[in-house]
Amino acid sequence: MKIDTLIVSNRLPITIVLKNNTFEIIPSTGGLVSGLANLLSRPDTFWMGWVGCEVADPALQALITDELWKKKLIPVFLDKDLAVTYYNNFCNEIIWPLCHYEPTLANYQEKGWLAYKEVNNIFCNHINSLASAAHIWIQDYHLLLLPELLRIKNEQVNSSFFLHIPFPIKEIFMQNPWYLELLNGLLGANSIGFHTHKDRENFLNTAYFNGLLQADKNDTFIYNSRVIDISYCPLGIDMLSFKKALDSDPYKFKFLHLKEVFKNLKVVLSVDRMDYSKGITERLEAVGLFLKHYPEHLTRVSFVMILVPSREDIPAYGNLRETVNATVARINSKYGSPSWKPIHFFSTSFCQEELVAFYRFAQVCLVTSLRDGMNLVAKEYIACQQQGDGVLILSKHAGAAVQLQDAILINPYNTTATAAAINTALGMVGIEKLARMKSLFQSIEQFDHHRWNSHFEERRRRFDIEEKKISKKPLELVGNRLQTIKLKYFRAAKRLFLLDYDGTLVPFKPHPKNSVPSQCLLDCLTKLAQNPANIVVIISGRNKEFLEKYLSNKNVFLVSNHGLSGTYPDAQWKKYTHAVAHWKSEVVKLFHLFSLPGTIIEDKDNSVAWHYRKVSFAGIIEWKNNLIKALEYMTKNYNCEILQGDCVLEIKPLHYSKGSISQRIISEIQPDFIMAVGDDVTDETIFNILDQEQVSVKIGDKQTKAKYFIKCQTQVIPLIDSISNYR
């Protein structure tokens, strides 16, 4: 059967229960399952994942595989020890605490990392054993290495990745001893998705800080000469399933039961896994403060806490369970009575219909996550309150808070304020409650699981179209290719060299003024230009004063400010265009407004540059993007363009470029050998005008129109020397 989309996650959306020599398949529930249910319903979509238990018998594995294939599920089998080390140690004692801002709980063990790599390789091999899928959609932090592993096997693989947990700030993520391997693994995907803008920015800052990404356009980025789409969209819930549950008999029975148990009482509900990221101890402290400071609610309000057991063999979770049990017992003992219990604690899970009864019955839902990727409990509660008068209290640190602004938003670390928020929610009048809930309901209805699914499908579709327009990957200029170019140079009667300066002839320095030519470079240029068949032109973004100071009298032509002025053809400085940058003073003011420690503003003849190479600010990418938006608005009526170079933004008139002056020089000289070398986006205007017979060279293996690339700037002088010395 043809597979169009293959969903890949740590677990399949089922549980296998082994019974003697047979097995039972039990469907699973949860946000990811419901979020992908619509996609899985398509005939050409399959789901791959671990079965959740050890199946040692090959014959039984074959039976399970056959049965699951009928459901379009593809099992991965792991032995128990490997699964425990991979899942418990690396996934949940390293990645999970770091991503939830609890680095002190991380337990770094080499064996966990080795198990994590092995499991990701098992998934990769299993995927490659199938007929190739048109698209592979990988889910969550258990499989961060998988995108790159798949690309190593097949460079043309089309894969996406969605992270369902928070992505932390770089200072925390980089505490992981293997963070670079994880980043490179994730960047193997064609597209990467997050729940929130903040998670996306944290990831981008981490990748940029480690020199892994180059900005492109429209939320796309360059990694290893590939364009990657990086976006965000909140996961929603299956609204229809909750509507059906509200009409079911199990719901009605449970709702009547709750009315009897909590007769004449208001209920504040919390539903979580037993996890330190959910702020359970902080919530219990807030409940204690509420009962102490607002005694009028004693015997009138009960707190229902449903805490589903989770990862109990990990020490941090066992300690949390003991703390919760002791705290609940202490609060109930201190404030309770024979006829009233402040906290009703359920250490179990409920079916959807029963859970919906709790949601519908509770007057308040309290979510106190210390950090959460999204938190679907908040949305599930709202879905059950369409005609109700419930109130949602939601942590600001949950991803859902960005979307659910009409909830009462709290900082769960401020337990006194949380207690006050509970009091406010219980005393809120009907009109305000209804207005808030109406707004919240409209929000989750608009951003349901269909919207989440369609968002990434549409982005993938558009991205696939755009990717086909991208030029093919450049060829590394080594071996026979280099030998062929040397031969072309040797046979040519008239040769033209078009050379960029910063990042090409000289390395970048923290301050532009320090990037002066070395003696080795000066000797190379002198020797190259002494050959009467050679014409050498340095085309730079630098101003003419800098070029004149360091590169004059070398028998080379100089072009400044990306083609504004130069010494070609008679060695005298002249302007090639009369475009006037009358907007410069406004841009300079804006650049000063956006200045940070480390930014440098360079005022040139007819342009202005904003350098940020020395900036260590974690939010520099978002800051730069905001500056670009401000520049676009300011200059929309001016004939100018924004150039994004290597850690620099530059604004210049639209009527000239490195490409336009190069075109003029080429048409006048009519050379039979052209070699252009450059490193950033401004040099692409030169590469664009050269045909495939000419030699265009990009510094670094990046997306480019150039035909060739060399790995780093230090190879430029040896490359030019090797060509010019060919005999």
Image (cartoon, rainbow, N blue to C red):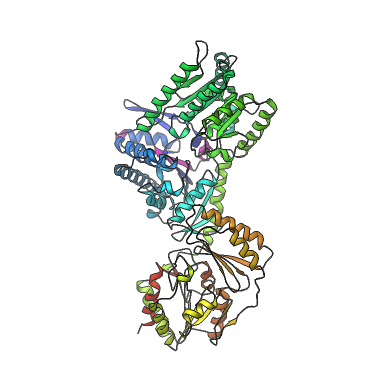
In the image, taking residue 323 as reference, residue 233 lies left or right, namely right
- The foreground one among 175 and 125 is 175
Residue placed farthest to the bottom in the image? 532
Query: Would residue 682 be seen by someone viewing this image from the given angle?
Result: yes
In the image, residue 184 sits, relative to residue 577, either above or below, namely above
In the image, residue 624 sits, relative to residue 727, either above or below, namely above
Location of the C terminus (image quadrant)? bottom left
Let me know if residue 559 is in the magenta part: no
Query: Would residue 707 be seen by someone viewing this image from the given angle?
Result: no
Residue 621 pos. (x, y %)? 52, 55
Location of the N terminus (image quadrant)? top left
Residue at x 34% of width, y 36% of height: 62
Residue at x 41% of width, y 35% of height: 68
Let me know if residue 46 is in the magenta part: yes
Residue 546 pos. (x, y %)? 51, 76
- Magenta span: 34-59
- The foreground one among 712 and 613 is 613
